[in-house]
Structures are given as C-alpha cells and as structure tokens.
Amino acid sequence: MQEYFKAFRIHADKEFKRAGIESLTINDLSPGEVVIKVEYSSVNYKDALAGSGQGRILRASPLNGGIDLAGIVVSSDSDQFKAGQSVLVNGSGLSEVHDGGYSQYARVPADWIVPMPAGLTAKTSMVIGTAGFTAALAIQRLQDNHQTSDQGPMLVTGATGGVGSFALQLLSQLGYEVVAMTRKKDQHDYLYSLGANEIVNSDEVKIDDVSMHKGRWGGAIDNLGGETLAWLTKSVKPWGNIISIGMAGGVNVNTTAMPFILRGVALLGVTSAACPQTLREQVWRKLGDELLPEKLDQVCTAEVNLEKLPEAFSNLLNGKIHGRQIVCL
Ligand SMILES: NC(=O)c1ccc[n+]([C@@H]2O[C@H](COP(=O)([O-])OP(=O)(O)OC[C@H]3O[C@@H](n4cnc5c(N)ncnc54)[C@H](OP(=O)(O)O)[C@@H]3O)[C@@H](O)[C@H]2O)c1
C-alpha cells in the first residue's frame, strides 16, 4: 500500500524540535502485525505535553502522537485479528516508543490490541480513552483493596479533567458519595451533573508540618500529586485508599509514615501505559458493560481534527477546557 495519508508527527530527540502534519505511507510506520484504519483518537494530558514540547514523553523520534486510537483492521498477519474488525489500542507504548493514533493509519503489535467491547463504538471508546480507562483501573484497585461506600466520601482531585470526570461519574454510578475538588469555580454545574455530591476548591489544601489531620475522606483518587497528595495522606480516614494517578500539580510528596502506620491508609499507584494486557481487556470489557459511563455526552466537550491539535493541547494545558477532547481522523 503506497497511498499517502496524514499524520501529526512529533520530532523530539534530546529536546523538542517540531510537531505538525506530515504525509506518510504505511511503510513509514512503526512495525506490527496489524494495520488499522484509525477513526478516532483523543487528547490526554500526556499527549498535550508530547505534542507541545512541554514534557519529554517520546523515547524514540520521530513518532506520530496520540496514546489512544480506535478503528477498523485493514490487514492482519495475526490469527487474533481479521480485516473489518473494530478494535482499540490505549497506552502500551503508543507515542512513547511506537507511532500513535494521530494518524489515518496505524500499524501495531497484535498483543497490544483490544477487541472493541460490546457496548462501545470507535467514538465512545475514545471519549473514554486513556482517561476513562485509568479511572476504571483506579476503581478496580480501590475495590480490590476493599474500599466500601460506608467508609466515607471519596475525594476526586483535578475533577474537571479527563480522568477526574470519569472517576467522579463512575464512583457515583457505583453508589459512593463523591466530593469533587477543582480550581474551576465556573464548572460546578458540570461536576454536579456528573454526580458530585459536594464540591471543594483546590485552595482547601493546607501545607503544614502536622503529621495527620482529622480524618475527612473515606478514600481518594488523585490526579495532582505534590502538595495535594501529601495533604490527602493526612486527611483520609482509617483503612482508606488513595489512588495516585497523576502529577499535574507536582512530583515530590512530603509526608510522614504516620497515616500508613496509625491509620492503615494505603497509597496505591496506577499505570495505564504499562497495564498487563489481560487486566486491560478485563477493564475495557467492564467499561462497555456494567461500568459503562452514563454521561459520555456531557464529558465529550470537543471534537477536533489533526489541524486543530496544537490549539487543543494549549487549551488543555492552560486549564481552558473541561472533560474530554476527541480527535476525528
Ligand atoms: N497513571 C496513569 O496511568 C495516568 C493515565 C492518565 C493520566 N495520568 C495523569 O493524570 C493527570 C490527569 O490527566 P488528564 O488526562 O485527566 O488531564 P486533564 O484533562 O488536563 O486534567 C487534569 C486536571 O488537573 C487539574 N490541574 C491541572 N494542572 C493543575 C495544576 N497545575 N494545579 C492544580 N490542578 C491542576 C485540572 O482540574 P481542575 O481545574 O478541575 O482542578 C485539570 O483539569 C495528569 O497528570 C496525567 O499525566 C496518569
């Protein structure tokens, strides 16, 4: 196949050089057994860092951006997939070591591919994308570690973001009382519409030398890291779980061992990119079935094309959008 197609390609060796639309052929793509005609991708925090040069995400260069993709198999050298099948890929090395989803075609290893779950389409799966998948993975970890709704309200930080929007609505769907923490005073209606029972402002986070505050949260899903995560370790009630997902607010966490030892608080990590494939497929199957997000239309706040990606990155990094932006190829 020597046809040319469009891709948003990032050149970033030791430092970021440029990113933009280029014409490629299938032979230019990273190797893999399965060629996919990409229909939709999405914009995640990591995509915005990679595509704008504000963060070092690529470990090979050049690469097509986009850590998510969904589309139709065009050709397959693997028995696992056949032409015409609807599939998705999220994380797994896309836009880090392998060409990603901001491209009209992708070529990927068969063992990264998830058959499209019943209940989802290419479009709805990309509204969910890595953000919703990671929120569902976080909830899986909470449940595996016995977090129950009677332990108290769950706090979701960075609540208007992609991960936050899904964490909030999925916890609410599962019957947890949910408190949303946000910087955006103009998005309270959005957060209530997703199921928030209460909203707190990010400036409630107080930095002090106290080892523990009065227990306030049954548990938490944290997108911010840094001072917020340190504060959370001090304010979660006994046996509560904190899921650390992101570090949009900082990397270093200054806390003590006291909450872990005296309250049995658990700090659990989540990594969507390196999620084992069996768990990945299990979580996606749930997202198409018993965990199907009920408010997908509210969460999808923009649909962009490849040309509009730089603007989409800038809007996300500058806190100008809420919810999820999807990319139509
Ligand atoms: N571990 C994993 O596998 C994994 C997977 C996906 C994402 N992540 C990480 O999770 C985080 C959220 O990702 P996302 O795609 O949901 O991004 P997003 O849509 O940009 O959401 C991040 C939210 O965090 C808040 N925020 C951003 N910058 C902030 C700052 N400097 N100080 C305080 N609050 C800030 C904002 O919420 P408010 O305005 O409502 O406060 C923003 O909407 C990112 O750090 C991302 O890298 C990790």
Image (spheres, helix red, strand yellow):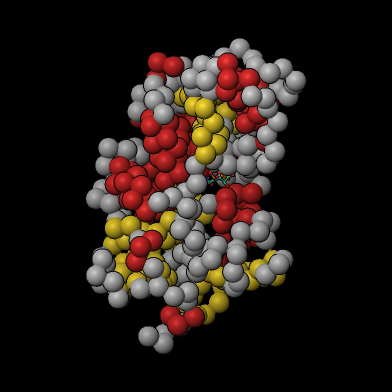
| Residue 121 as seen in the image, left or right of residue 170 | left
Q: Is residue 194 visible?
A: no
Q: Residue furthest right?
A: 209
Image point 52% across, 20% down: which residue?
Answer: 264
Camera-side residue: 252 or 136? 252
Q: Is residue 165 visible?
A: yes
Examine the image and state in which quarter residue 114 appears.
Answer: bottom left
Where is residue 106? Give x, y as percent. Answer: 42, 71
Question: Which quadrant, please, contains the N terminus?
Answer: bottom left
Question: Which quadrant, please, contains the C terminus?
Answer: bottom left
Camera-side residue: 276 or 140? 276
Image point 28% across, 71% down: which residue?
Answer: 78
Q: Residue furthest front?
A: 261
Where is residue 45? Give x, y as percent. Answer: 57, 50
Placement of 284 over or under 252, stated as above or below = below
Tag count in the figure?
Answer: 0
Where is residue 157? Give x, y as percent. Answer: 56, 32
Placement of 305 over or under 222, stated as above or below = below
Quick check: which quadrant has ligand 1? top right
Q: Residue furthest bottom?
A: 2
Examine the image and state in which quarter residue 57 appears.
Answer: bottom right
| Residue 297 as seen in the image, left or right of residue 213 | left
Where is residue 51? Give x, y as percent. Answer: 61, 61
Image point 49% across, 80% down: which residue?
Answer: 28
